[in-house]
Image (tube, coloured by chain):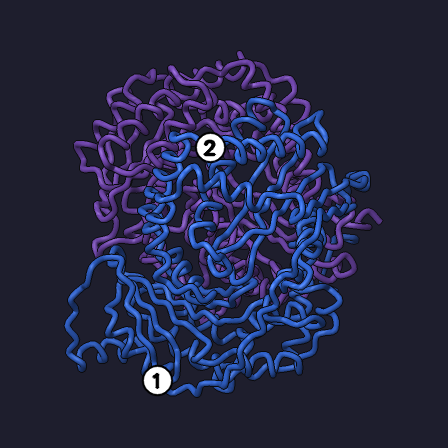
Amino acid sequence: MMRKFLLLFGSLGLILSSPAFAQVHEFMLDNGMKVLVKEDHRAPVVVSQVWYKVGSSYEPNGITGISHVLEHMMFKGTDKHGPGEFSRIIAENGGRENAFTGRDYTAYFQQLEKSRLAVSFELEADRMRNLTLPPEEFDKEVKVVMEERRLRTEDKPRALTMEQFNAAAYVSSPYHNPVIGWMNDLQNLRVDDLRPWYARWYAPNNATLVVVGDVEPQAVLQLARQYFGPLKPSELKPVKPRREMAQHGLRQIKVKAPAKLPYLLMGYKVPVLRTATEEWEPYALEVLASILSGSDSSRFPRELVREQQIAAGVDVGYGLYSRQAELFVIDATPAEGHTLEEVQQAIEVQLERVKTEPVSDDELARIKAQVVAGKVYELDSLFYQAMQIGMLETVGLGWRKLDEYVDRVRAITAEQVKAVANKYLIEDSLTIAVLEPQPLAASKAVTKPLTKNNKQGSKK
Amino acid sequence: MTRMQKTFVILVVAVLVVGLMFVGSRKTEKTQQAPVSQNGLQIETWKTGNGARVMYVHAPQLPMVDVRIVFDAGSARDGDTPGLASLTNSMLDQGAGEWDTNALAERFDSVGASFGSSTARDMAMVQLRSLTDAALLDKAMDTLVAILQQPHFKESELQRLRKQTLIALKNQQQSPSTIASKAFFKALYGDHPYATPTIGTRESVSRLQRQDLLAFYKRYYVAENAVVAIVGDVDKAQAHQLVEKLLGKLPKGKHAEALPAATPLAQAERKLLAHPSSQTHILVGQLGMKRNDADYFTLYVGNHILGGSGFGSRIMEEIREKRGLAYSSYSYFSPMRVEGPFVMGLQTRNDKRDEALALLDQTLRKFIEEGPTAEELEHAKKNITGGFPLRIDSNRDIVDYIAMIGFYDLPLDYLNTFNQKVNAVTIEQIKDAFARRIHPDRMLTVMVGKGVEE
């Protein structure tokens, strides 16, 4: 494999000139697969990622979680490579690999010493179209996913609250459903549900290959043509928009679960880059989120945690790169001796302030300084760079949006921050969830010395 | 970390990954590293006038620098007040020099620097990432100097952090994995300083006073007890200046005392803790190895095959791949100053816990009796050595590595001889080391879940 790769370089006589640092090279294969390559010659390594335009937001009810289960099954073999072979071969080449599923994408990656890139291409191309989906493997793997759901959600009171919160806030948007799927849907999922899902979405014209590392773009293109080029494209039917319906007033829910600490979630419906009518608005929301929370000098940690000491923690979550409209989420844990109501009131006072007073020049300057520095720091991780490129491409924004980020954020004014606060942080589009802790079973410890006779798991 | 940077981290966390890969190898080989040229990593080291050890790697490719200062001031130094080391470390940036907590945070944020501090059992650290533009770096460094040399330990800030810690402790009580891990350390280490949780206990944190923190700071945050790691776009002369500025005025002091030896369990023990979770969290283990253990590479490679390398490792095969019993299943050695733990772990639905526990035991026994196959060993070596460049492919990874090498006094060529040492490991050595070191009849088993007490 390694040999083939080296020969390829030699025989094509490519000029290995390296273009400007940090530039993305974009190519399109004849079958519609997009190839994006970014050179980074700091170390003799490469990260390769294949991104598919499918995730939980593509799923109809009844089969929620299917994209993620399919992601697991992608390691269970093709005609050419049996179950587990993929991972074995990557490991034998010193690679690290994994995959992840989100609302808007499913992606597979390998990190390798640079000469092994062809190994990754061959295997990824193979499983893009030739997955066997053995029923006996499915039966075991769907159990693994149910254990994963128990681990990540069922036994974590905050995660459970977040899941209920999303289900209340989003009604017609597919973001209503958890990425991992509802337990009942997982219990009733069959391997035959996966076959059409795989056939529909796993095709070169629905995929983007992202390669970042110590590589030469034309050589990567040649290699991509060799392995991915022969794959047949699918006919892709357009996806229905499934936009979230308008909300007509406050929604509030309560979640009861065994826990020690109460927890508050407040989410306002806001646009993202793909849905915004004014393109500056999502950037203004980014700045607003940073004014409130995120670094130690922002308002929530300073005023609610350190000065008023009403909250043990308050955070803001907003991402402007989703496919569908998002929530501007504030989550908080009360400090000892304070209630959720008090925390909520204190948050509301802060929100009122950003609606009425312009944020200070110093605050804006700090956020902009962090954004500029962050752009340099992110170059320390190949994986992060590839992740950003792949995500923006896959949600339909295009990787070029990444280059605009710093300038767009720097252009945001105090007036614009105030304007988005007034326009979007309104009660009629708000959903609130509270976690009301239920008693945990008394944790009585039992310690037993074990004798030879009763020791666990002895061989019979 | 700024919120903007955090956005992507959150996205990554919000997505579901097919497996918790390399759980074991990550913990074993604590830092993942990053590589460099064919000559390996060029580490330069020297001591400051007052005795701090400096580890430096020149990485001029990006206009940024990472600085990490590690003190032998982890929770192993807590004495009879668990949480002291951690609280002392957390107080460093809560007011220092001429600045209060808010002013310190503003100073870092205004130059886009990211500051962090943390405490583990062996070490306490502070770290800074900054751009190397002179004006920005100077402001960040002046701030860090105050944090290291002139922390206030103000009473009002201490009260706040104490309350925060108590909330964090409550949060841990709703996490079965944290409950299991704390019970495991407590039972395994008994009277040893590793037994107590780094965060402390409710009782101890409630009674810690300002003078306790001040005394701890004066004893342990001294030059002789410090290792500084620097990686970035600063030349050696600049690195010298930086270190002198940061630590030059710290008292010389003395290195921390040697830690007591840990005593292995005399017999098997079980800790069963009821928790209303749908899964039982299982940890099985015993004392493992030291960071500079003579058997380090043998146990590391052996564990890679047993349960340290995710898919393809024996535990993962038996528990997850063959039976679908768990999402995550692994084994690891956590090498520390004194013997850190050897742990096998998984989480499975409550009604499968006996089956899963028996499988862990069988898998371990078989591995100790038979050792790895030649094919397994060959495969593990290819995996570990072939992926070597990935270990040190970022400044972040390099800082992790050189700080660790400096702190534990590993040879400077640790990384450059890494592959060679891995390749030298034999089946017989693995069998021998596991037989000598790992005792299936004297394991500690911790289970947290519903109905475990029956």
Classify 10 Å Cα crowding around label 1: few (below 14), some (14-19), many (20 and above).
some
Residue B445 shows up from this direction: no
N-term mark: 2 or 1: 1
SS at badge 1: loop
Mark 2 packing: few (<14 Cα in 10 Å), some, or many (20+)? some
- Residue type highlighted by circle 1: Asp
Question: Can you tell which mark lies on residue A30?
Answer: 1
**Mark 2 residue element:** loop
Which chain corresponds to the colour purple? B
Q: Colour of chain A?
A: blue
Point out residue B260 in the picture as x, y percentages from the top left corner: 52, 29
Q: Chain of mark 2?
A: A
The residue shown at (64%, 27%) is A310
> Residue at the spot x=61%, y=28% of the render?
B164
Q: Position of residue B435 (x, y in %)?
A: 55, 54
Residue sticking out furthest to the right: B454
Asked whether the viewer can see residue A270, the reply is yes
Marks 2 and 1, Cα distance to the nearest angstrom? Answer: 52 Å
In-front residue for pair B170/B193: B170
**Which is more toward the observer, B11 or A141?**
B11
Q: Tag on residue A145? A: none
Quick check: B307 left or right of A187?
A: left
- In which image quadrant can residue B245 be found? top left
Q: Chain of mark 1?
A: A
In the rendering, at what x and y percent does residue A196 appear? 60, 83
Foreground pick, A97 / A51: A51
Q: Disc 2 designates what residue?
A: A358
Name the image quarter holding residue A445: top right
